[in-house]
Image: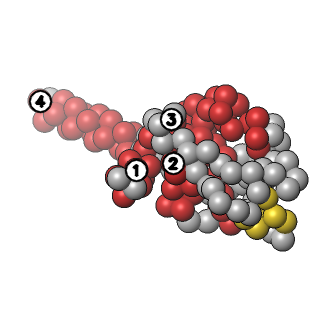
């Protein structure tokens, strides 16, 4: 009887660990959803005035955030743009030019806020890309100092 009881306990523990392994972050998991919710708030408070509610920007002034290489491409470059801003002339996106400078956000937003808003933008407005993590933002911030 004691052996059976031990086998049941071991089985329950194993199931508990198996269940725990299924809760690790998967695409579309709870960490992504939480980051997206926080990022949406940051977008609405900080980014929307220039990039607009639909993220299509303002022609010739503020660039769109919809399916561009800037948003879907290199995360390091995107993080650096948000941290340091973009100044000094026009940028071209999909054949259109934009010339309103992007102000740096390194003194205005935390690493987590930047990670969340970039995760939100990279997974909203028809975009689909990987999450940006707080650690990635923190690493880019250190490079700039």
Residue corresponding to mark 4 = 2
SS of the residue at dot 2? helix
Please name which of the two marks, 1 or 4, marks the residue nearer to the observer.
Answer: 1
SS of the residue at dot 3? loop
Please report contact status of discs 2 and 1: CB closer than 8 Å, yes or no: yes
Front position in the image: 142 or 90: 90
* Quarter of the image where one finds residue 90: bottom right
Residue, far right: 59
* Quarter of the image where one finds residue 74: bottom right
Name which of mark 2 and mark 4 comes first in the sequence: 4
Name which of mark 3 and mark 1 comes first in the sequence: 3
Question: Which residue is found at the position 54% from the left and 62% from the top?
Answer: 77
Q: Is residue 15 left or right of residue 118?
A: left
The local crowd at label 4, few if under 14, some if 14 to 19, many if 20 or more residues have their Cα within 10 Å, is: few
SS of the residue at dot 4? helix
Q: Is residue 39 visible?
A: yes
Residue corresponding to mark 2 = 83
**On residue 141, which mark appears?**
1
The local crowd at label 2, few if under 14, some if 14 to 19, many if 20 or more residues have their Cα within 10 Å, is: many
* Residues at marks 2 and 4, CA–CA distance in whole angstroms: 62 Å
Please report contact status of discs 2 and 4: CB closer than 8 Å, yes or no: no
* Residues at marks 3 and 4, CA–CA distance in whole angstroms: 58 Å
* Residues at marks 3 and 1, CA–CA distance in whole angstroms: 12 Å
Colour option used: secondary structure
Name which of mark 1 and mark 4 comes first in the sequence: 4
Q: Is residue 6 left or right of residue 91?
A: left
Percent position (x, y) of residue 19? 39, 39
Does 30 appear above or below 133? above
Please name which of the two marks, 3 or 4, marks the residue nearer to the observer.
Answer: 3
Residue corresponding to mark 3 = 109
């Amino acid at each position: 009887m004691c052996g059976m009881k031990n086998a049941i306990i071991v089985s329950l523990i194993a199931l508990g660990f198996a269940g725990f392994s299924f809760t690790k972050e998967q695409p579309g998991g709870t960490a992504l959803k939480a980051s997206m919710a926080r990022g949406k708030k940051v977008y609405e408070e900080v980014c929307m005035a220039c990039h607009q509610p639909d993220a299509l920007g303002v022609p010739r002034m503020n660039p769109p955030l919809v399916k561009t290489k800037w948003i879907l491409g290199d995360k390091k470059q995107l993080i650096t743009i948000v941290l340091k801003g973009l100044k000094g002339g026009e940028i071209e996106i999909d054949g259109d030019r934009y010339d309103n400078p992007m102000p740096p956000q390194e003194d205005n937003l935390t690493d987590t806020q930047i990670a969340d808003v970039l995760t939100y933008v990279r997974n909203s407005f028809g975009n689909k890309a990987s999450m940006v993590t707080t650690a990635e933002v923190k690493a880019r911030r250190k490079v700039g100092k």
